[in-house]
Image: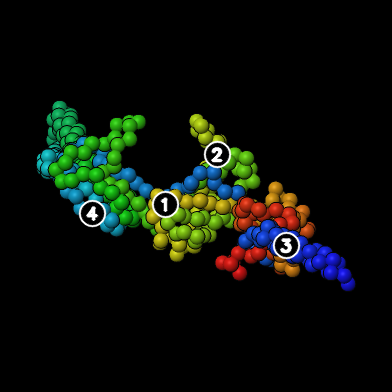
Amino acid sequence: MTPRFMHGLMTLFLLALVAGGLWYLNRPQAIEVVVRAVETGTVESSVSNTRAGTVKACRRARLSPGIGGQIGALEVTEGEHVKAGQLLLALWNRDLTAEIALNQAESAAALATARSACLQAQVARREADRLAKLRHRGAVSEENIDKAETEARALQAGCESANAMARVAAARVDVVRARMERTRLTAPFDGVVAEINGELNEYVTPSPPGIATLPAVDLIDNTCFFMTAPIDEVDAPRVAVGQPARVSLDAFGARRFPARVRRISPYVLDLEKQARTVEVEVEFTQPGDIRELLAGYSADVEIILEQRKQRLRIPSEALLDNAAVFLFIPQRGLIERRAIETGLSNWDHTEVLKGLTEGDLVITSVDRDGVENGAPARIEASDR
């Protein structure tokens, strides 16, 4: 070989080496992606609430006295557990206590008067009957007999009148006792005192009609809870009483509480500037879960419309336009877009009918820059 040929060959080699180095330095960088394997499991179709729902107690009573007055006795404290019929609060009622005592005394006097009148009526009746027997012997005049009969009837009427007055006096006692009951708040059911609005000697008044005021005592039954949540009117026709559901609460993180639909509102709620919704009530199905709840928790509900087991599924976050996914091909280190056919779906999983096989790696980080068909990729270090 001539020196010129060798020089040219060396030049071509150097140029190829430079070009290769430039290509290597400027080659597309592999994108880190998060992947999940296609698996077999349960898939579901479900609907969820449009706004946050609320955990409520099955029984809650916001209690206030039936009349206004000063608080004379406060028998409970906030957080205390009480039994049905237990006294919670009483207004000052010494005047009513004195009135009851007075009416009881008047009732006793009326009963004594009635007994006296009835005894006199019995004596008069016996005398009239005795004279009636003597009339047959001609020993008593007709005038005396008429007089005795009239007196017996008059005294009997007096007896009946006295008895009626005694019943009136007893009824007055009952009336005052009823007024006394309006000064006392008793627990209508077993529960816990959530709130007390008032202190000893403070004046409380009942709520006027149509105007809500703070209750004197707020009582909650903490042995039974349910959740209310608004469902979009479009989804409402597919919801039925008895359908299974899952409830999530911010206070419990990722934990899910099993539940079922117990009631669907019979009308659509139309609120200004908000979507029209239907109120749905969901009850918790595990008694042990209820002991951990508090009324007022915010909650979300997922109502399960249909469920299929042992189906091929992928995370729903990997789905593209409900018709494709990005696959990671580990042998080539590339991303491949693949069309698929889907079935049931919810927020967590989507059923795959065609296009994938178990073990395929679908990319869930589809929103990252550079994730596209044919792009080089590698599995994110934290996801290996």
Q: Which residue is at the front of the view, 326 or 101? A: 326
Q: Which residue is at the front of the view, 1 or 55? A: 1
Furthest residue toward top: 143
Amino acid found under the numbered disc labelled 1: Tyr
The residue identified by callout 3 is 18
The residue identified by callout 1 is 297
Residue 124 seen in this snapshot: yes
Amino acid found under the numbered disc labelled 3: Val
Disc on res. 278: none
Where on the picture, by quarter, is residue 235?
Answer: top right
The residue identified by callout 2 is 277
Q: Residue at left 29%, top 31%?
A: 208
Q: Of the residues under marks 4 and 1, which one precedes in the sequence? A: 4
For disc 3, the neighbor class at 10 Å (few under 14, some 14 to 19, many from 20) is: few
Q: Quadrant of the C terminus?
A: bottom right
Q: Which residue is at the front of the view, 231 or 320? A: 320
Where on the picture, by quarter, is residue 184?
Answer: top left
Where on the picture, by quarter, is residue 19?
Answer: bottom right
The residue identified by callout 4 is 77
Contact (CB < 8 A) between labels 1 and 2?
no
Q: Residue at left 69%, top 51%?
A: 320
Q: Which element type, helix, strand or loop, lies under badge 3?
A: helix
Comparing labels 1 and 3, the label whose residue is closer to the camera = 3
